[in-house]
Image (cartoon, rainbow, N blue to C red):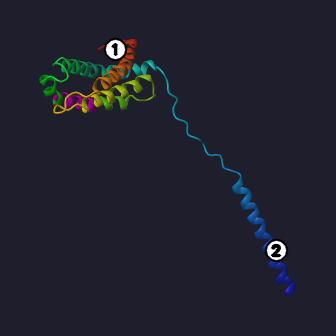
Amino acid sequence: MVSSVVMAVVLAVAALVLSIITAVRDTSTPIALPVPHPEEEQLFVEGADKSLCEVIAPLMREQSDRTRNFQNTGDPASPERLSAIPNYKSETLRWAERIQPLLNEHAQPPRYLTRTLQRYIDGMLLYSENMYPERGPDSFDNATYESAIVDYGGPLGTCYKVGIRW
């Protein structure tokens, strides 16, 4: 009887050792998980570009006209320009709130037009939000505006290529 108990204990220990070795071997082999790949960026997608251009054209024209009218109020430090800042800021914010959802709806596939349009929207918000009538012009105003206008060239050029003009 003692030999049966000893034999059972030896078999149990052997089974335990084998299960530990098997468990260690199983965890040392990594399980290959699928790696998500972001959608590849593209330059131009004519149908998607044209669709986005059609819906943004009136808003792009509106913002161009608004900015031109604002800048034509006078020199940056003039009382006329300073008094026009609050209205320009609020109208630009309302414009951004209207154009952003249109961009979001037409953002797929990601491409040159969507990237440059987003930068233009953000640039115009930065330009308008960083002006204060009580402070006057700041040394970064021109650089911020010029950067936004460079980004404006992306939508302008792409939309012209697909026959949409503003």
Provide the residue span drawn in magenta. 87-98
Q: Is residue 104 above or below residue 63?
A: below
Secondary structure of the residue carrying tag 1 is: loop
Secondary structure of the residue carrying tag 2 is: helix
Q: Which residue is mark 2?
A: 11
Q: Is residue 163 above or below residue 77?
A: above
Q: Can you name the residue that lies furthest to the front here?
A: 139
Question: Most prominent secondary structure in the magenta stretch?
Answer: helix
- Location of residue 61 in the rendering, given as x and y in whole percent from the top left corner: 26, 18
Residue at screen point 37% across, 28% down: 118
Corner quadrant of residue 5: bottom right
**Horizontal side, residue 126 vs residue 157: left or right:** left
**Horizontal side, residue 166 vs residue 33: left or right:** left
Residue at screen point 39% across, 24% down: 116
In the rendered structure, find residue 146 and report the number of the disc placed on it.
none
Q: Is residue 40 above or below residue 150?
A: below
Q: Which residue is mark 1?
A: 164
Q: What's the residue type where badge 1 is placed?
A: Ile
Residue at screen point 76% across, 70% down: 16
